[in-house]
Image (cartoon, rainbow, N blue to C red):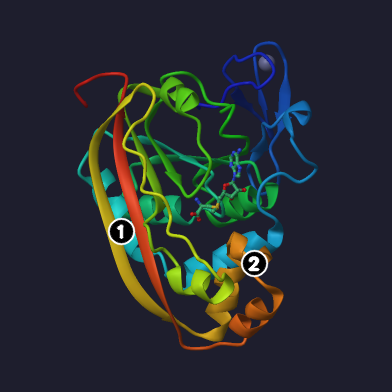
Amino acid sequence: MVWRCPSCGQALEDSDDRLLCPANHSFDRSKEGYVNLLPVQKKRSKRPGDSLEMVLGRRAVHQALLYQPLAEALGDVVAERPQIKTLLDIGCGEGFYAGVLSSRLPHLALYGVDVAKPAVKLAAKTYPHHHYAVASSRDLPVMTSTIDMALCVFSPSNDAEISRVLRPGGFYLEIGPGPDHLWQLKSALYEQPREHKPARCEMVDGSLWEEGELRYDRTLDNGLLRALLAATPFAFRGRRESRAALQAQSDFLVTIAFSWRLFVVGETGAQ
Ligand SMILES: C[S@@+](CC[C@H](N)C(=O)[O-])C[C@H]1O[C@@H](n2cnc3c(N)ncnc32)[C@H](O)[C@@H]1O
Ligand SMILES: [Zn+2]
């Protein structure tokens, strides 16, 4: 058990259908199996993170395997390092990447946090063998030096928290958009679309160990195009008429582009 009490910072232990710390702070396990470790006073809004609609859009995108090549590439990075046994997915969404990793590498103990309750609920329901908590990446409810690899795919992260929870010599794998990720969608929505900024090569308390890019095209039918729109901030941006025209399209060609960076934390030589 790597979870720590958000009230006092001590280790949480399983006790029937809840988690309990030595100071008797208690957190109920939901019927899906996740725990809510986000203190009410740290909630920045009533429903933080992605809405249910966005979560369901992302689930449809993942079920259509649009990002499967990325999941396989991440699987390669993890599989090359058999010393990785405990992995924390930060901003895990509905659990897709952890799901691919655990089916390929069943020895992994998988933990996931996301600030959005609908995302964590769906992840816990789909992957009952993983461990999920509602929590923010700004304040991870995870004991210090317990994680071998932290993963963050297109989600907000916090270097200080990542290096705290990783064991010395542990890995942080960060994935962001490549410059022309979903370029055709942006071009259809915005008059002056901009490329994504290059991925960062520096991390506080970490050193860049390996990096890679992945880029491919896919043709989306109307259902998948709508799901992708619902899953991204594009759903709310762009001109209304452009959005309506885009939502009516089918056979829409889109470029998918990722950059990944592997950092090693706390020590100069990765173990
Ligand atoms: C673009 S989605 C990526 C989800 C998942 N990694 C994937 O690629 O399928 C970003 C996720 O970050 C979550 N999120 C936003 N702010 C967060 C925070 N401060 N801490 C943890 N998760 C956060 C959102 O709820 C959402 O699920
Ligand atoms: Zn406590």
Left or right relative to 207: residue 38: right
Picture layout, residue 61 above or below residue 270:
below
- Tag 1 residue: 72
Picture layout, residue 228 above or below residue 35:
below
What residue type is disc 1 on? Glu
Residue 146 % position (x, y):
42, 23
Give the residue displayed 52% in from the left and 88% down from the top. Answer: 250
What residue type is disc 2 on? Ala
Label 2 secondary element: helix
First along the sequence among labels 2 and 1: 1
Give the residue displayed 30% in from the left and 65% down from the top. Answer: 215
Give the residue displayed 50% in from the left and 73% down from the top. Answer: 187
Give the residue displayed 45% in from the left and 28% down from the top. Answer: 159
Left or right relative to 182: residue 222: right
- Tag 2 residue: 235
Q: Ligand 2 sits in which quadrant?
A: top right
Residue 167 % position (x, y):
36, 21
Residue 259 % position (x, y):
33, 52
Label 1 secondary element: helix
